[in-house]
Amino acid sequence: STASVSTLSTLTSTPLGKIKKVRHTSHAAQQKRQNKKINERKRKEAFKMATTIYEAEKKKPRGTEGKLSAVAVSELVAEKTGIEIGKRTIENAVADGRAGLSPPKQGRPSTLFSDEQFENMVNALESFIKIQQLNGMAGKVTSSKLKQLTFRGIKT
């Protein structure tokens, strides 16, 4: 028992090495971005292919010979493109009516402004500019002044 405690304290007291930050040259960084973009495009195309095929298969009557399941469609697309699309992903996309469309962006959707709040902000800025122009103060409405007003409106 004491041996295991001393081993544990030894393990926790020894510092772990720092992770080295690898910096890419501008060419390597650009190549990495290009490769990422190509992979994203391939994944989008595979997603579109999978959802289109599955939607067509789903429209076939029950018991039809050779009707493909979502798993079979996923395997077919993986065989053709080399990219695996999950069975549930295909089923959910078709159920949501997104067959043949690009997949939704990753992550949580933005909640900064609702459409109504954004519209109100734009209308307020337009009104402010018109009032300043009518008062002959159009020269005092600079882009930096508008930015300040906009950010003040966002904070409240």
Image (cartoon, rainbow, N blue to C red):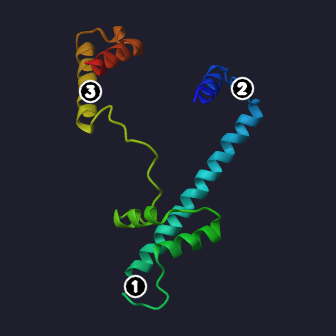
For label 1, the crowd category at 10 Å Cα-Cα, with few meaning under 14, some 14 to 19 and many 20 or more, is few
Q: Amino acid at mark 2?
A: Lys
Of residues 132 and 10, the one nearer the viewer is 10
Q: Which residue is outermost to the front?
A: 1
In the rendered image, residue 135, in percent from the top left (x then y), is placed at 23, 10
Residue identifier under label 3: 121
Residue identifier under label 2: 20
First in residue order: circle 2 vs circle 3: 2
Residue identifier under label 1: 60
| Quarter assignment of residue 124 | top left
First in residue order: circle 3 vs circle 1: 1
Q: Amino acid at mark 3?
A: Met
Q: Secondary structure at mark 3?
A: helix
Q: Amino acid at mark 1?
A: Lys
CB contact under 8 Å: marks 2 and 3: no
For label 3, the crowd category at 10 Å Cα-Cα, with few meaning under 14, some 14 to 19 and many 20 or more, is some
In the rendered image, residue 87, in percent from the top left (x then y), is placed at 47, 66
Q: Secondary structure at mark 1?
A: loop
CB contact under 8 Å: marks 3 and 1: no
Identify the residue at horizontal 36%, vertical 87% (top origin). 62
First in residue order: circle 2 vs circle 1: 2
Q: Secondary structure at mark 2?
A: loop
* 45 horizontally vs 137: left or right: right
In the rendered image, residue 9, in percent from the top left (x then y), is placed at 61, 22
- 13 over 52 or under it: above or below: above
Identify the residue at horizontal 32%, vertical 19% (top origin). 150
Identify the residue at horizontal 42%, vertical 90% (top origin). 64
Identify the residue at horizontal 67%, vertical 21% (top origin). 14
